[in-house]
């Protein structure tokens, strides 16, 4: 199984050692009838130029640029897209990262596609053919950095830069011809395990230890992209232990990596994960801004702050993180999550690109220089569990290259590369995929409120599952009202944005419906812009969401999937329908028990 | 650590092979100044007679009866109790069982005192000294059967009667001198693993397989008490697979054991554990009656139906199971649970004997012939995690001997045997222990409703944790009312009882408060007998329960515990206070959000 590389040869020969070699091989095998000349043009870097003269193509580019150009040309031609006579492109974001949350025991945190592609039993363990396919998949959609281990660095991954470095270097060799550089998640407290009495980032011995480590690591993997760090977050060690701030921590590591051109990618997922539910003054979405905004401008040039796209944690609908809008003097990466942690575990169909496009619309040009996405890959034969989950990886790559990519074009290209469908069937599947996020949103948590999910596992409804827990994610629904007031009259979260942004959301009568309960606490009788009451809108969304899921199943039943996909898709669709029905009925019952207000259309709400 | 056997020698010599030997040894070491003659009187069986003439004691009894008599004499004298000149006693219940839920991997299902005393790493693994202490603990309070493995028979415990039989026989040797017989939990489907094509209880090959197995087992352990079976329950195999009923299943095993005098103890914990929360016609408490009542009179003489004391599952307050009242022509055992699964995990103090006494009050004499209790023991140095949890094992033994035992006497004897307290301190601790169940009830789930607990783990509050789950345990609290109507106008559960019993509970105005929400669905404004509203009573109970827990902590701080106990007790008390506060605040908030009704006394209920 080659994911969307269906028309590509099963395997890439091992003796191909450069992007140009790979490019030529892929061309020869996918477009044997086309005459294509490859021109090495280092000045283009990762960019490329495709030029057509009569029946002759010329692709120019710097080393990996050449490969990106070739993959683009192949895919456009295979998909039957029009290729202009002169087509130039270069990536908008310099690091286009895929973050694996793989543990060395072989498990994958929030993984829904089987076990790790890289590890098993506390050591490296992989199938070289699958690694090469992963390299092709990433390069074919334009990704260039792969972090192979979980940001929660458990034993023995803490020793990845030590005992396992030779194996890591070997793995890096597989990815290099595809223009992909590795990255490692590191444990900030690591010096403590090597005779250094502290991990204080300002301590000279600590700085020395990290400098030595970087030297040793780069001597083995000279093109390593850098280190990814989750510090002072959900129990991970970090600079706070030593009374230092996160600029102190990140800059120390940055100094160690700077001689080698490496980056420190520093995650900004810091909040109080031991909150008391009784505390109404702390509001978790405010946390990232409070921890980082004041540090704007104080980070080294090779520090990238990696910020989750929203202020919570990958819910179906969140506003853009204020950090991504407000930190103008710091390098930023936006972090997305392909793994469907809160969005259906790769059982429910959930195509993300419409959501991502909304995020980028809210983001002024130039505010971020990189993007990252938590991987949805695993050892399942099709890599992504649900065959449709591959569209998220593919379109993420296109968007990470240039966020202006057209949504439908991207999805249709994935369909054409993956399936051999008629134009009509292609449109049916595209419609289904493009609507799937909204469908999921409708049958799950209403109007931006999020979190009505089973704790820990994060699949299936549990309207009060987090309500009295330590995680700072409360809706405080009572018999009259639901939601948290995050405006200036409430927790003040909205004050972390610019005035013009605030004005869009501050007034519940003007606030877009989809974010209504994220920003406001409102009575069930609140009148929405379309005249419906809030409670009626909640019921309507849930009934409609479930109905749409039923129709998705009908559509799927009629589409001509190949056998190996059909079984997976139908079996998962059955589970999705069960899940959608549970969500619909449980959330409606929950709100009906609270509000006592019946559905205007007399649809069945269980007591 | 010798639990309550503080004044006994640390160890029993290995060459003592009969109850009489043990009896003599214990006497010589605990009452060296007393002259005691032991008289073997087989006609007394497990009973004993203690006679005093001037300064001379005579204890007569059949083999283990002698040992029980001696333990009783020793403990009464050590506790300073008056021993009448002639004191005769014999057990009211013939099997007085302790059921371990130990798995062979060393874990203990619902165990809160460390790992298994018997198993580790898939095999037998124990400290002979601790096994002998366990034998003494059991014999000293009158228990005579020990089931060593979990009723959920996981790999490799399924092979206990096969590959591990010699080791099991060795373990039985340790217990025999203490008058204790082993019992094993068995897997009903076991013949399938031995070349028999079915486990159908009416199939001759199956009957033969079990007959052969019994023969083999009894050749190694001739005094084995029998087999314990959990069938067709929570995923365990059973007769239903073959269209047979539970009399078919139990009788088949009974026939296999009957040549050797063994019992089949057949658990009646059968219900639909995949219930749809939308289904309001199925009511889980009705399940046991529905599955067993019609079989009354159709079981073999050596079948004992083991029935959980209440119709749900060891909640803090449940009515007596209707099976225990209604099955007059079947041998019955009542199952209690020492392990504090739903009652505080041996962190919160919870002394059970007041609860048990209530159960026995509702039970006509002669209705049950045996008792069983799920063990609260583990590898912790003190065997029970919380030192006070030992009082539950000890008083369970006394009650299993004769349920007329006086509650305070039993608890005080345990205190005297365990601690060297003044009379005043002893009373303080006794008051604390005897009130602890009511305190726990007050701060947890109100008025018989149960189940407002964290799912799976069963510690800490989660008012809607089971509300939309598959387990059939719903309260359906809404903005107006709470509880399930289980009377004849509701699910009809109450109709499983006699008319006189029903009359006590049918009318909410007459139904005892403590069972009110078990039997009725009532509005928050319902007037209780004392004039309070239901909602006010819920608030009052929770605030009072927490306040009482605070006072328990104050009492404990003043009592002179030995060092090794003090640390355990205080550390757990701190956790109990946290837990009690969480329960109090969360349940009050939950009901305040629903009802919108404020506390009459203006105490703080969080929004």
Image (cartoon, coloured by chain):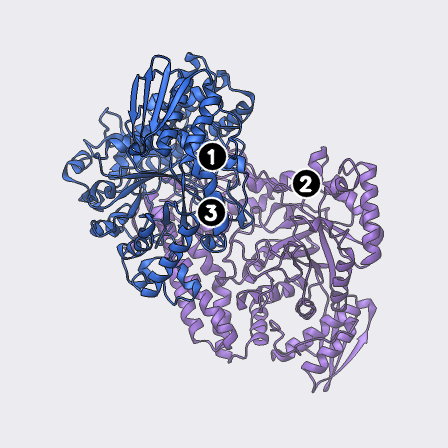
Chain colours: A purple, B blue
* Nearest-to-viewer mark from 1 and 3: 3
Where does the C terminus of chain B fall, quadrant-wise?
top left
Residue B599 x, y percent position in the rendering: 35, 26
The circle drawn on residue A401 is none
Residue A156 x, y percent position in the rendering: 69, 50
Measured Cα–Cα span from mark 2 to mark 1: 44 Å
Give the left or right position of residue A131, taking residue B240 as reference: right
* Residue A264 visible from this viewpoint: yes
Q: Nearer the viewer, residue B75 or B523?
A: B75
* Nearest-to-viewer mark from 3 and 2: 3
Q: Nearer the viewer, residue B84 or A220?
A: B84
The circle drawn on residue B134 is 1
Q: Residue at x 37, y 55 (%)?
A: A540
Circles 2 and 1, Cβ within 8 Å, touching? The answer is no
Give the left or right position of residue A144, taking residue A203 as reference: left
Question: Which residue carries the number 3 mark?
Answer: B169
Give the left or right position of residue B154, taking residue A107 as reference: left
The circle drawn on residue A237 is 2
Measured Cα–Cα span from mark 3 to mark 2: 51 Å
């Amino acid at each position: 199984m080659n994911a969307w590389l269906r028309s590509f040869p099963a395997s890439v020969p091992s003796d191909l050692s450069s992007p140009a070699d790979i490019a030529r091989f892929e061309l020869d095998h996918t477009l044997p009838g086309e005459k294509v000349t490859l021109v090495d043009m280092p000045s283009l870097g990762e960019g490329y130029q495709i030029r057509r003269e009569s029946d002759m193509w010329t692709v120019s580019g710097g080393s990996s640029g050449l490969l990106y150009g070739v993959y683009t040309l192949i895919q456009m031609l295979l998909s039957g897209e029009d290729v202009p006579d002169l087509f130039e492109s270069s990536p908008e974001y310099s690091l286009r990262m895929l973050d694996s949350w793989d543990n060395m025991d072989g498990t994958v945190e929030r993984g829904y596609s089987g076990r790790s592609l890289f590890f098993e039993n506390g050591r490296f363990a992989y199938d070289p053919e699958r690694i090469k396919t992963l390299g092709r998949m990433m390069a074919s959609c334009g990704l260039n950095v792969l972090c192979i281990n979980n940001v929660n660095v458990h034993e023995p991954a803490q020793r990845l830069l030590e005992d396992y470095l030779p194996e890591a270097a070997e793995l890096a060799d597989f990815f290099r011809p595809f223009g992909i550089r590795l990255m490692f998640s590191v444990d900030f407290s690591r010096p403590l395990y090597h005779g250094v009495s502290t991990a204080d980032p300002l301590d000279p011995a600590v700085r020395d230890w990290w400098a030595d480590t970087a030297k040793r690591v780069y001597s083995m993997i000279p093109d390593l992209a850098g280190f990814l760090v989750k510090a002072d977050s959900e129990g991970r060690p970090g600079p706070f232990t030593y009374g230092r701030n996160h600029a102190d921590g990140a800059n120390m590591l940055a100094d160690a990596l700077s001689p080698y051109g490496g980056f420190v990618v520093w995650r900004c997922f810091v909040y109080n994960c031991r909150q008391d539910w009784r505390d109404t003054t702390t509001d978790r979405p405010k946390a990232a801004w409070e921890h980082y905004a004041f540090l704007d401008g104080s980070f080294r040039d090779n520090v990238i702050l990696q910020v989750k796209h929203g202020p919570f944690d990958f819910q179906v609908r969140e506003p853009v993180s204020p950090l991504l809008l407000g930190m103008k003097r710091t390098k930023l990466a936006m972090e997305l999550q392909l793994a469907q942690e809160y969005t259906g575990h790769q059982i429910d169909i959930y195509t993300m690109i419409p959501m991502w496009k909304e995020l980028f619309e809210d983001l002024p040009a130039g505010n971020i220089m990189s993007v990252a996405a938590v991987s949805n890959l695993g050892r399942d034969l099709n890599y992504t569990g649900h065959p449709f989950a591959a569209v998220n990886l593919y379109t993420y790559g296109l968007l990470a290259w240039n966020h202006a990519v057209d949504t439908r074009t991207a999805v249709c290209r994935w369909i054409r590369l993956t399936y051999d469908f008629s134009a009509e069937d292609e449109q049916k599947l595209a419609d289904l995929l493009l609507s799937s996020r909204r469908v999921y949103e409708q049958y799950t948590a209403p109007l931006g409120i999020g979190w009505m999910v089973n704790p820990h596992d994060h699949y299936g409804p549990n309207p009060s599952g987090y309500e009295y827990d330590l995680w700072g994610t409360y809706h405080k629904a009572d018999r009259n009202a639901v939601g948290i007031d995050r405006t200036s009259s409430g927790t003040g979260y909205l004050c972390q944005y610019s005035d013009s942004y605030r004005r869009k959301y501050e007034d519940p009568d003007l606030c877009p419906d989809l974010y209504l309960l994220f920003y406001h606490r409102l009575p069930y009788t609140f009148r929405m812009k379309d005249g419906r009451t809030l409670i009626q809108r909640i019921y309507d969304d849930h009934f409609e969401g479930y109905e749409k899921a039923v129709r998705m199943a009908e559509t799927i039943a009629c589409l001509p999937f190949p056998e190996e996909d059909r079984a997976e898709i139908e079996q998962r669709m059955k589970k999705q329908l069960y899940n959608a029905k549970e969500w619909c009925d449980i959330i409606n019952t929950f709100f009906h028990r609270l509000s006592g207000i019946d559905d205007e259309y007399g649809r069945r709400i269980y007591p």
